[in-house]
Amino acid sequence: MSEFKSKIKTIEWVEDYSRMVDQTVLPYEFRYVDIKTGQQMFDAIQMMVVRGAPAIGIAGAHGVTLYAQELQGLPREKFIAELLQKADYLAGSRPTAVNLMWAVEKQKQIIKNSASDTAGIVEELKRNGIRMQAEDIAINRKIGDFGAEAVPEGAVILTHCNAGALATAGYGTALGVVRSAFAKDNTIQVFANETRPRQQGARITTLELTMDGIPVTLITDGMCSYFMKKGMIDMVVTGADRIAANGDTANKIGTYTVAIAAKYHNIPFYIAAPLSTIDTSIQTGNEIPVEERSREEVTHINGKIICAPEVNIINPGFDVTPNELITGIITEAGILRPDYNTSIKNVFSFV
């Protein structure tokens, strides 16, 4: 397993609350915020203080614990009923990232199945959240190491949005592949799409790669096909927020465009994501709910309007890349290949 160690710890449980990097102020300021109530966690997830599917999942697990602490004084039966309602409420804070629903459901199973009193349930939820946090980093390292095997020597890797340490508990999925590859070959380089409208590639990917000493070049979203045609991109690796049973993949808006350009230029296009991102309850990407976000994300940059105030805005947060454009899905169990209906079914039969 790779020995590369990122300097970044995105989210962790501290005593009786959750501490996370506030990603809304990056790269101007690198600061941690303490989330001490369930509602604060709901707001942090919805407002993208914490973002990235795996990190949102960990935040969801911590959020259920926070609600449990608040409700702990209730009689046990009422405590369980209200806590399950709060858990469902929390799971609705962002609808696309399936890791959130997955993590909340894991906590709900503890609530339903525990024989403990309310204090004991709180402790079980806390321990499970901390365990999931540690497991996320271990899973990401496995993803990174499997993905590194597909990276050619001296490769230039294009990525979109941020699927790095700051999208997970601390290592990264797509950037986990980069980190593991760079640990073996320090000639690896990254091209990062800026990722409009919230600029996660510009604000976050470039920050964490420069912090870790990995060469990165920032380009605008519309430039990727230009550099592909010039032969300057060797492969694409992005993260995912939800993957259907057939391999169709939802990721940050703009990913589909990159996948089309990569296909045209015969450039391998990989998705890097934990198995928890695969939603086998849905058959195709047509069933993935796509979050519609606020118009201000498009009309404003740094608080200043950049267009006519009256203009109509449509702002989907994600798009869905069809499975035929995806070379492989890099998971902690290895790289899944087409036909994805079969390879996904097979991997889940062994876990």
Image (tube, rainbow, N blue to C red):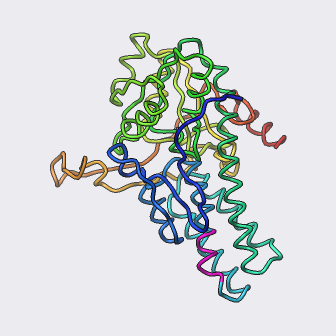
Q: Is residue 71 magenta?
A: yes
Which quarter of the image is occupied by the N terminus? Answer: top right
Task: Tell me, yes or no, if residue 116 can be seen here.
Answer: yes
Q: Is residue 187 left or right of residue 83?
A: left
Q: Quadrant of residue 112?
A: bottom right
Magenta segment, which residues? 65-72
For the point 53% across and 35% down, which residue is it? 321
Q: Is residue 85 above or below residue 256?
A: below
Res 325 seen here: no
Q: Quadrant of the C terminus?
A: top right
Provide residue 120's location: percent of width, then percent of height: 76, 75
- Residue 312 appears left or right of 27: left
Kindly report the secondary structure that dominates the magenta region of the rendered protein.
Answer: helix
Q: Position of residue 309 (x, y in %)?
A: 16, 54
Q: Is residue 143 above or below residue 168?
A: above
Residue 130: quarter of image: bottom right
- Viewed as shown, does residue 118 lie left or right of 9? right
**Quadrant of the rendered image containing residue 4:** top right
Is residue 235 rendered magenta in the image? no
